[in-house]
Image (tube, grey):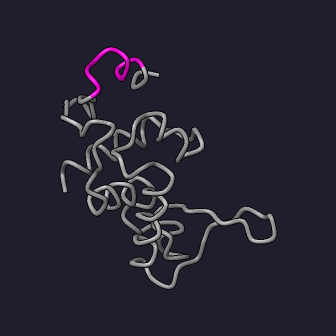
Amino acid sequence: MEARVLQETVPATQVAAHGVAHDLPEVSEVADLDRLAYAVAVAETSNCTRGSGVSKNNCFGIMTWPNGVRQLKWYNSTQESFDDFKRVWLRGYGGRFPTLADAVKYTGSDRAETWLSIVTEKYYEH
């Protein structure tokens, strides 16, 4: 809730991540997809070192629906996972830096504010 209030009360180009204000790309500006992919991989799987990042080379928690059954997608390599994330982000989110609404959509409302904070911090750190 704090991030939602923050997003509504400060300029769209700023957000607080772990107490530090960062200048963000405008919503219409395309994000650096390599930096964004790294940041999301950290938020999702500690940069491919935990969970599906290790067991399925799926660094992003990307799902698939074979025969109508939702499951984590398998990749032959983590690079394939990174490439697919960039494709998914371009198609589903327009390649922009994520907003809180994007974070809610991507995470399925699973700690979206925390996810966005980590992504923001790692995007600007890398």
Q: Residue at x 52, y 47 (%)?
A: 106
Q: Quadrant of residue 39?
A: bottom left
Q: Where is 98 relative to 18, above or below?
A: below
**Is the stretch drawn in magenta largely helix, strand or loop?**
helix
Q: How many marks?
A: 0
User: Picture coordinates of residue 38 (x, y %)?
Assistant: 31, 61
Residue 113 vs residue 72: left or right?
A: left
Q: Residue furthest bottom?
A: 76
Q: Please, is residue 84 above or below residue 26 in the view?
A: below
Residue 35, placed above or below residue 75: above
Residue 34 horizontal/vertical position (percent)? 28, 63
Point 81% across, 70% down: residue: 67
Q: In x, y percent, where is residue 28? A: 32, 39
Question: x and y percent of residue 47 in the render?
Answer: 36, 64
63 and 29: which one is in front?
29
User: Looking at this view, is 56 or 30 the one in front?
Assistant: 30
Residue 6 colored in magenta in the image = yes
Quadrant occupied by the C terminus = bottom left
Quarter of image, res 14: top left
Q: Is residue 96 left or right of residue 123?
A: right
Left or right of 114, for residue 76: right
Residue range in magenta is 5-12
Q: Is residue 89 above or below residue 4?
A: below
10 inside magenta stretch: yes
